[in-house]
């Protein structure tokens, strides 16, 4: 028998085997004879029928199916070969299927994908495992597409076009007929929607839904990033119209329903370029010597009523998206920047958490409810920091947001200094309880009027930032505690953070030990304190950003859920998000639930809120991915103008295809491809986190300092390639 015939015969045998399991597993409680199975999988010829009978006998002998009566076969319990899972496509074209409850992922070669894309939900057939071999299978059918729209570039032909997706995981182009092209031109970046994929054609059919513009242009690339993640950048006309028609005036009858705090000293501290101010602090000294501090949050839920098109839109968005040059808001401007923004000398509706604190920052009393405030002042972080550092209310011109020097009242100075003092006590208590202190350096770009990057600066968290942070944490924690400790248990939205994965921590320890650091795994408390010591020890060192990043990656992801397990990173048993309803939908849900329970309402529908929590967590992940991509895009854009310069960098990642280097001076990260490193043939050593020269034994490992130059910048694919400058040439 020729190789080809043998291959065809084996293929047919596998098809029949799959057919047997498909029939038996579809109805696991029924038994079938060979005739019934043959009918169900459309076997008509004698050869196939004989193969079927033979395979039934073999499968029974191998105890993969059972014969319940003579000639009657049934699937064995717990021996499924068909599973549902999610596709994880690699850049090389093959995939792994992640199946819930299965320890190993299922490998799928590229020719067995059966039209499945990245993150699709699929049904997968798993081949019998051979000795010591990884699980392997093929996709039987796509159950649910993760997405059907893709960003791509138009390749125009005479009477039709192909759109080449920019996502490296998309392995096929998309055919677009002439009547579905709209006004797209050759070479333009577009958003294309897949409409059909007939069995007998190589490429799916699609239609262009939006022309994004010329590749490489700033707006095109920013809109592309949003489009890739399915994030909108404008509000539908009917939603905008609805928002514009809202009555945002302050009414006396509404004020009477609320605690009136308009005469209490209140101010906001925000970034200097902030447009929405969703939190304010109030301060007053009580006769007993304690301090009453109010955390006042914009009462978004007063305006954002349930079951309106505006609420539906806010829920779908779930979060504002902060890109390098713009904010894509969750709410239209009439709310985010006007009605709900706690601007100075304007009466505003708020939802408040008010605490009585003693000199040791111990809570003596608390109150939650709806209020009305009138903020006295607005400060930038830099101005508040100046007050904290100098103890003076004289704000110099160079940091003033009023563009001129001015003087702050003594009572505001006193309030700022006392709240800073109390915030530091609260922070110390948190750290003692095992909270983690992440002060990761954030890269920011100075942009000119054309959104071109002209410089890089680093955002650092100082005392003024930490003051706001501590009081927001206090409000979030106490709101969560207030509901979470009630009996009987009530449905609520929690922000949870699971314990870190022990394997990831071990891997992190392996890396940081190279720099002379060590983690202590004795118990939960020692892990936290040794992680904090690590983060403190690397501050200001060349490896800081790398260690900070790797430590964050070893952590679990914080998510929203109704099932509270506490927050590991903050060392809180109860935690929620209450303080940013302008930019986060979960905070809106928390406001509604809190008011519902303050009014004596019954426990809300658990299933409904868990679904909303999952959606919010998913959208948060998409938004942060888009934000990362926009930073990467701007880094590449910035480096385009520095092609002839040499930079010192730190190796931040090592892979089989190359090493990642982060430039020390500006935190831009690019890759040196392994094939581009001259002088030797380099091999990847996974255990050493290094590449090693075969002949010279020259080693490049994680954390090493190297000198690089820009080799290539690709704004469209968002690739930054470096060339390595050998040390001996310097």
Image: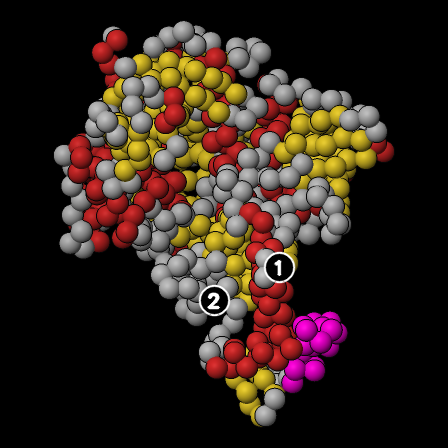
The residue pinned by badge 1 equals 5
In the image, residue 491 above or below residue 28:
above
Q: Residue at x 14, y 34 (%)?
A: 516
For the residue carrying disc 2, how many other residues have a C-alpha within 10 Å: few (<14), some (14-19), or many (20+)? few
Q: Nearer the viewer, residue 153 or 220?
A: 153
The residue pinned by badge 2 equals 128
In the image, residue 464 above or below residue 713:
below
Name the magenta segment's main secondary structure.
helix
Range shown magenta: 33-49
The C terminus lies in quadrant? top left
Q: x%, y% of residue 438?
A: 30, 36
Q: Residue at x 70, y 82 (%)?
A: 35
Q: x%, y% of residue 501?
A: 31, 52
Residue 717 at least partly seen = yes
Left or right: where does residue 491 sit relative to residue 51?
Answer: left
In the image, residue 298 above or below residue 496:
above
Left or right: where does residue 326 sit relative to residue 243?
Answer: left
């Amino acid at each position: 028998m020729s190789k080809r015939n043998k291959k065809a015969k084996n293929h047919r045998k596998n098809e029949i085997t799959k057919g047997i399991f498909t029939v038996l597993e579809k109805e696991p409680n029924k038994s079938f004879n060979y005739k019934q199975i043959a009918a169900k999988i459309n076997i008509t010829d004698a050869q196939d029928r004989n193969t079927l009978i033979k395979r039934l006998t073999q499968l029974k002998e191998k105890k993969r199916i059972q014969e319940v009566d003579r000639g009657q076969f049934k699937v064995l319990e717990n021996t499924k070969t068909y599973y549902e899972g999610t596709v994880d496509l690699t850049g090389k074209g093959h995939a792994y299927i992640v199946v819930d409850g299965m320890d190993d992922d299922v490998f799928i070669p590229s020719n067995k994908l059966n039209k499945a894309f990245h993150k699709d939900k699929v049904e997968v057939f798993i081949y019998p495992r051979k000795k010591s071999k990884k699980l392997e299978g093929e996709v039987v059918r796509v159950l649910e597409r993760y997405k059907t729209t893709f960003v791509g570039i138009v390749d125009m032909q005479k009477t039709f076009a192909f759109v080449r997706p920019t996502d490296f995981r998309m392995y096929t182009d998309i055919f677009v007929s002439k009547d579905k092209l709209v006004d797209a031109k050759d070479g333009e970046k577009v958003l294309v929607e897949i409409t059909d994929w007939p069995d007998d054609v190589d490429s799916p059919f699609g239609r262009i839904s939006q022309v994004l513009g010329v590749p490489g242009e700033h707006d095109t690339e920013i809109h592309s990033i949003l489009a890739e993640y399915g994030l909108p950048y404008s509000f539908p006309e009917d939603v905008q119209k609805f928002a514009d028609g809202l009555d945002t005036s302050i009414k006396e009858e509404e004020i009477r329903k609320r605690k009136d705090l308009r005469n209490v000293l209140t101010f906001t501290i925000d970034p200097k370029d902030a447009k929405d101010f969703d939190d304010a602090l109030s301060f007053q000294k009580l006769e007993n010597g304690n301090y009453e501090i109010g955390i006042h949050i914009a009462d978004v839920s007063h305006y954002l009523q349930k079951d309106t098109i505006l609420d539906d839109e806010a829920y779908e968005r779930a979060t504002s998206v902060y890109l390098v040059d713009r904010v894509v808001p969750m709410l239209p401007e009439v709310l985010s920047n006007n009605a709900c923004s706690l601007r100075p000398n304007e009466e505003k509706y708020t939802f408040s958490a008010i605490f009585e604190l003693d000199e040791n920052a111990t809570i003596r009393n608390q109150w939650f409810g709806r209020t009305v405030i009138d903020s006295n002042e607005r400060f930038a972080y830099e101005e508040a920091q100046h007050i904290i550092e100098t103890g003076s209310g004289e704000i110099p011109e160079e940091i003033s947001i009023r563009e001129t020097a001015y003087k702050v009242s003594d009572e505001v100075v006193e309030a700022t200094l006392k709240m800073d003092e109390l915030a530091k006590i609260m922070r110390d208590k948190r750290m003692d309880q095992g909270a983690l202190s992440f002060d990761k350096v954030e890269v920011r770009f100075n942009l000119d009027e054309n959104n071109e990057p002209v410089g890089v600066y680093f955002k650092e968290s100082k005392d003024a930032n930490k003051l706001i942070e501590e009081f927001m944490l206090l409000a979030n924690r106490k709101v969560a505690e207030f509901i979470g400790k009630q009996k009987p248990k009530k449905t609520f939205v929690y922000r949870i953070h699971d314990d870190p994965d022990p394997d990831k921590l071990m891997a992190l320890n392996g890396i940081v030990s190279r720099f002379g650091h060590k983690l202590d795994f004795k118990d939960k408390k020692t892990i936290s304190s040794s992680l904090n010591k690590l983060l403190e020890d690397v501050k200001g060192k060349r490896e800081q950003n790398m260690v900070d990043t790797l430590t964050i990656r070893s952590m679990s992801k914080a998510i929203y859920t109704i099932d509270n397990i506490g927050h590991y990173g903050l060392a809180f048993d109860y935690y929620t998000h209450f303080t940013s309803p302008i930019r986060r939908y979960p905070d809106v849900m928390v406001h509604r639930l809190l008011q519902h329970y303050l009014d004596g309402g019954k426990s809300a529908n658990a299933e409904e809120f868990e679904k909303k929590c999952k959606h919010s967590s998913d959208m948060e992940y998409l938004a942060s991915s888009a934000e990362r991509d926009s930073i990467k895009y701007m880094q590449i854009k910035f480096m385009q103008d520095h092609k002839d310069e040499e930079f010192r960098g730190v190796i931040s990642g090592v892979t089989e295809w190359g090493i990642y280097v982060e430039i020390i001076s500006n935190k831009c990260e690019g890759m040196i491809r392994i094939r581009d490193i001259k002088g030797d043939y380099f091999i990847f050593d996974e255990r050493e986190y290094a590449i090693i020269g075969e002949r010279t034994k020259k080693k490049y490992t994680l954390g090493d300092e190297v000198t690089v130059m820009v080799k290539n910048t690709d704004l469209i694919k968002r690739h930054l390639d470096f060339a390595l400058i050998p040390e001996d040439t310097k």
